[in-house]
Image: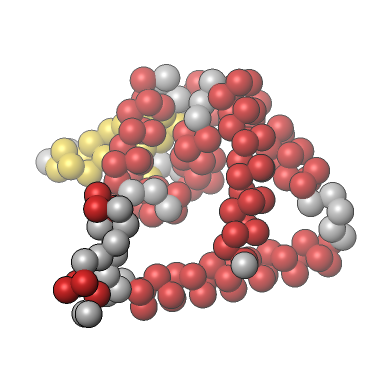
Amino acid sequence: MLLYRLNGIRAVGGGIVLRLCEGRFGVTRREWVVLALLHASGPVHSSALAEKANLDRSAMSKAIVSLVRKDLVARASRRGDRRYIELSMTEAGMALLERMIPVMEDLNARILADLDDREIVALDGLLDRLQASVHALERESAPWPAADRRRGGRLDSAERGS
């Protein structure tokens, strides 16, 4: 059960990242992801950043509002189009990342310590392939009906085709 095993790794590793982010650096895990992606991309439109982070617009908006409030990210709207919001790092955001990145790199190195260089390269390639497979499956599954969670996660018999 691949997704179960990956979720287990994410849950334990994510807990470590959560403690580091919130306890040591004062940002949430989601804010860390946004900061790291913004650092890698440079100034970018908020929807492009949401796509890179695999976040819906609402989650991205909450993270951005919080990061702006903390003076780690700046927002600027395009002249003539207030809906277009470009995000960029502030000096405080850059200073925070300069402290965070070495800690996160060390954490990644410790997680991968039992793998040799060849295995790390192979794992990276396998993860790329799995990600592509999941995205293809996501496109294929788009028309599948979703359960109505408000009613206990079940479809009624008419919706199931019974």
In this view of the protein, which residue sits in the foreground, 132 or 16?
16
- On-image quarter of the N terminus: bottom right
Displayed quadrant of residue 23: top right
Q: Residue at x 22, y 80 (%)?
A: 162
In this view of the protein, which residue sits in the foreground, 49 or 9?
9
In this view of the protein, which residue sits in the foreground, 157 or 86?
157
Displayed quadrant of residue 94: top right
In the image, residue 123 sits, relative to residue 33, either above or below, namely: below
Work out which residue is located at the far left of the displayed protein and give it: 80
- Where in the figure is residue 7, as x and y percent of width and height? 59, 53
- Where in the figure is residue 21, as x and y percent of width and height? 59, 28
Q: Is residue 79 left or right of residue 118?
A: left
Q: Is residue 161 left or right of residue 95?
A: left
In the image, residue 8 sits, relative to residue 119, either above or below, namely: above
Residue 20 visible to the viewer: yes
Displayed quadrant of residue 77: top left
- Where in the figure is residue 57, as x and y percent of width and height? 29, 46
Q: Residue at x 54, y 21 (%)?
A: 26
Residue 39 visible to the viewer: no
Q: Residue at x 62, y 28 (%)?
A: 19
